[in-house]
Amino acid sequence: MEKAIIVKNVSKKYKLYKKSSEKILDLITPKSYGEDFYALRHVDFDAEKGDVVGFVGINGSGKSTLSNIIAGIVPETTGSVTLNGQAALIAVASGLKGDLTGRENIELKCLMLGFSKKEIQAMEDDIIEFAELEKFIDQPVKSYSSGMKSRLGFAISVNIDPDILIIDEALSVGDKAFAEKSLEKMKEFKSRGKTMIFVSHSISQMKKFCEKILWLEFGVVKEFGPVDEVMPKYEDFLEKYKKMSKKEKRKYREGAIKNNSKLKTTTI
Amino acid sequence: MKSVITVIKEQIEHFYLVKRLSLYELKSSNSNNYLGMAWEIINPLIQILIYWFVFGYGIRQRNEIPLENGMEVPFIHWMLAGIILWFFFYQSTIKGSKSIYSRLRMLSKMNFPMSVIPNYIIFSQLYIHLVMWFITVVIMQISGYPINFYYLQFVYFLFATFIFIFALALVTSTLSTIIRDVHMFLNATLRMLLYLSPILWQISGIDDPFIQTIMKINPLYYLIEGYRAGFFGLGWYFIENWEYTLYFWAVTGMLLIIGSTIHVKFRRHFIDFL
C-alpha cells in the first residue's frame, strides 16, 4: 500500500533562555547559549493511505508539536517528514480574522490555500451549510461564540478536501450534534481513503474512530500499533499515573526524560 | 542573487492573491469605523492641514517656495507634492515591518510564500496613495499647475518607490521577526526621517553644499524631488540627475539583495522566533 505520511527520525529542539540577552547572543555568535529542550526526540512513524492514526499521551508529550510538524507549520530541527498529498490542520484557533465576516473569512482562507475564484465560489455554499451559521455568516467573526468559530474552521478545512487531515482537539468544542456530524464527515473521508490524524484526550472518541495509535511520552514514541493493542496499555498507564502523588509523578517524569536522552546517544 | 530571483518570481506568480489580500487588508482594518475606508484618506488630510498651518502659515509666514527654475509656488502645493509620497512610504514601511510577525500564526500553514506578505501590505497602501495622488492632481489643476508632459515620469517614480519600499520591507520584516526591537527602532528612525527629507522645509535652502550632499543620501529625497518635478513640470528629474538615479538604484538593489537573502534564509524558521 502507498504511504501517505513518512516521519523519519524527527527531533524538535527548543531553546530555553534565561535572559533575552542570551537569545541575541545565541543568534549572532557561533557559541551556543541557553538550555536545550527536546519536544520530540527521534520520532519515527509512518501512515498508509487511508489510515486513521490517533496521537495520545499526557500533557507535554509532544502531540501538538508533532501534528504541527506534519502539517508543516513548525519546522523540524532534524529528520524529515514526507507527505503524499496536501495536509490540512484543524485546530480550535484556526486562523480566522475577527474583523471580517464569516463569508469573507471563507474567501480569504481559501485564497490563501491556493484556490481560484471559481473554485471558491463553488465551495462557499457547502461550507456555509456545513458550518450551520445561518444569519451569522455575514457578521464579523469576533462576534461568534467559540463553538461557532470552530464550526466555521472545521467546515472550511473539511470542504477544501485535503488528502491528509490533522484534527487537533477541534471536536471538543462544538455540541454533540455537531460532533456527530463531524464524525460522520470523517467517516466519509475514511471511506474515500483519506489519511487522518486525530489528536484528542477523549479516549472513547479515539476508540470509536482510530485504527492505529501513536503513544508519545515526553517527546518519544512509547508505542505504535493497532488501537486494541495500544489503547488498553495507555489506559492502564493513565490509571496508574493518576494515582501517583505529585512527587512520584515528578520522579517518573525525570526518570523518563533521563532514559530518553540516553536514547539519543545510542541511536546516533 | 538567486534569492532575489526567487522572491521576484513568487511575487509575479501570486499576483492575483496579492490583489485580493490587499483589499481584505484594507477592509478588515477599517471595518469598525462608520466611515470605513474613508478614514484612510481623512487621516492624512488632517495631518496635511496641521503641517500646512504650522510650517506654511506659522513658521514660513506664507512665503512662497522658490523652485530651481525660478518659479515660486505656495507652500501648500509644494508640501502636498512631497507629503503624499511620504505617507505612502511611512505607512507601508511601518506596516510592512510588522507584517510577518503579526500574521505568522494565521498564515504559516498556507500555500503561498511568505515574501508575498509584505508585498500585499504595501499594495493595500498603494491604493490609498493613488487616491491621494489623484486628489493632489485635482488640486494642482484648479490652482494653476496644469497636467503637463512631465507627468509621464510619475510612472517611473511610482515604480521606483514601490520597489524601494518592498526591498526595505523585506529587510525590516525579516529582522523584526527575529528581533522585535528592530520594529521599535524603525519607528523612532522614521519619525526623524520626516524632518530629514525635503517635505516640510526646503533642504536645498541650506548654503553648505556638504550638508546638502549628506541629505541626499536619503533615497526619499530623490523620489520626492522626482514627484515635484512632475507636478510642477520642472523637467525629467531622473535623466537630468542621472548620477542620483544610479545611486538610488544601487541602494535599492543592495536592499533587495540583502532583504531577499535573509528572508529566504530565515523564513522556514520564522515561527520559532514567535
Image (cartoon, coloured by chain):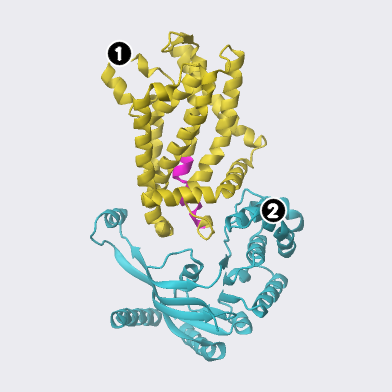
Chain colours: A cyan, B yellow
Q: In this view, does B87 lie above or below B186?
A: above
Query: The magenta stretch spans which residues?
Result: B94-105
Question: Where is the C terminus of chain B found, in terms of image quarters?
Answer: bottom left
In depth, the one of B146 and B82 nearer the eye is: B146
Q: Percent x, y for residue A124? A: 71, 58
What residue appears at the point 38 percent right and 52 percent down from the top-left corner?
A: B2
Tell me the kind of residue under disc 1.
Asp
Query: Magenta segment: does it hold B155?
Result: no
In depth, the one of B184 and B147 nearer the eye is: B147
Q: Is residue B237 above or below residue A10?
A: above
Residue corresponding to mark 2: A103
Q: Percent x, y for residue B161? A: 46, 33
Q: Percent x, y for residue B252? A: 38, 37
> Would residue A33 be found to the left or right of residue A41 on screen?
left
Query: Magenta segment: does it hold B98?
Result: yes
Q: Is residue A36 above or below residue B88?
A: below
What residue appears at the point 37 percent right and 23 percent down from the top-left corner?
A: B241
* Res B199 visible: no
Q: Determine the main secondary structure of the stretch shown in magenta.
A: helix
In the picture as drawn, the residue positioned furthest to the right comes out as A135
Foreground mark, 2 or 1, reads 1
What residue appears at the point 62 percent right and 43 percent down from the top-left corner?
A: B27
> Would residue B30 be found to the left or right of residue A263 on screen?
right
Q: In which quarter of the image is residue A216?
A: bottom left
Q: Which chain carries label 2?
A: A
Q: Are marks 2 and 1 on the same chain?
A: no
Residue corresponding to mark 1: B207
Q: How far apart are marks 2 and 1 (CA)?
A: 60 Å
For label 2, count other residues whose C-alpha is less than 10 Å away and answer few (under 14), some (14-19) or many (20+): some
